Image: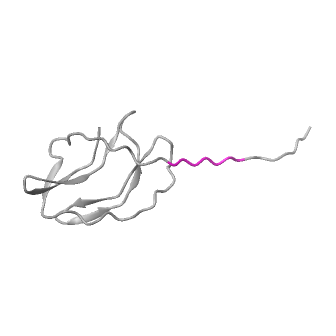
């Protein structure tokens, strides 16, 4: 007996917000003394997550002897419950510091 009918294909798209900002201490060697503060952040579009377990790691200016824009991307946390601490810039004690991002 032959049956005819429709084949339904469902497409699922996930959109995750940027990870929460958590104040914490960077890992050893996580701070770099820089010559100047970074430029204003660039505006970028968040794409569709490849999987619901991924988190968006936003673009950021990184110090490589000068400020260089590193575009945002989706990343899979190294373990369940890990939180991405975004790279950031601080000014303290009369010096400029760039603090690398890390998983906590």
Q: Is residue 81 above or below residue 34?
A: above
- Magenta highlight on residue 10: yes
Q: Quadrant of residue 23?
A: top left
User: Residue, x 68% and y 46% (percent of image)?
Assistant: 10
Residue 5 location (% of width, % of height) = 85, 45
- Taking depth in this image into account, of 73 and 6 the one nearest to the observer is 73
> Which color scheme does this rendered protein use?
one colour
- The reply, left or right, for residue 104 in relation to residue 32 is right
Q: What's the magenta region?
A: 9-15
Residue located farthest toward the left when viewing the structure as drawn: 94
- Magenta highlight on residue 74: no
Instruction: Report the quarter where the C terminus lies.
Output: top left
Residue 48 location (% of width, % of height) = 51, 53
Residue 85 location (% of width, % of height) = 30, 44
Residue located farthest toward the right when viewing the structure as drawn: 1
User: Residue, x 48% and y 47% (percent of image)?
Assistant: 16
- Taking depth in this image into account, of 17 and 71 the one nearest to the observer is 17
User: Residue, x 61% and y 47% (percent of image)?
Assistant: 12
């Amino acid at each position: 007996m032959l049956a005819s009918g429709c084949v339904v294909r469902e497409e699922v798209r996930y959109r995750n917000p940027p990870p929460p900002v958590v104040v914490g201490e960077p890992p050893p060697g996580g701070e770099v003394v820089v010559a100047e503060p970074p430029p204003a952040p660039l505006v970028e579009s968040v794409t569709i997550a490849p999987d619901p377990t991924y988190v968006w790691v936003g673009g950021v200016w990184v110090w490589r002897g000068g400020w260089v824009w590193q575009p945002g991307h989706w990343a899979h946390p190294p373990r369940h419950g890990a939180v991405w601490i975004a790279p950031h810039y601080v000014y303290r004690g009369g010096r400029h510091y760039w603090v690398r991002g890390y998983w906590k």
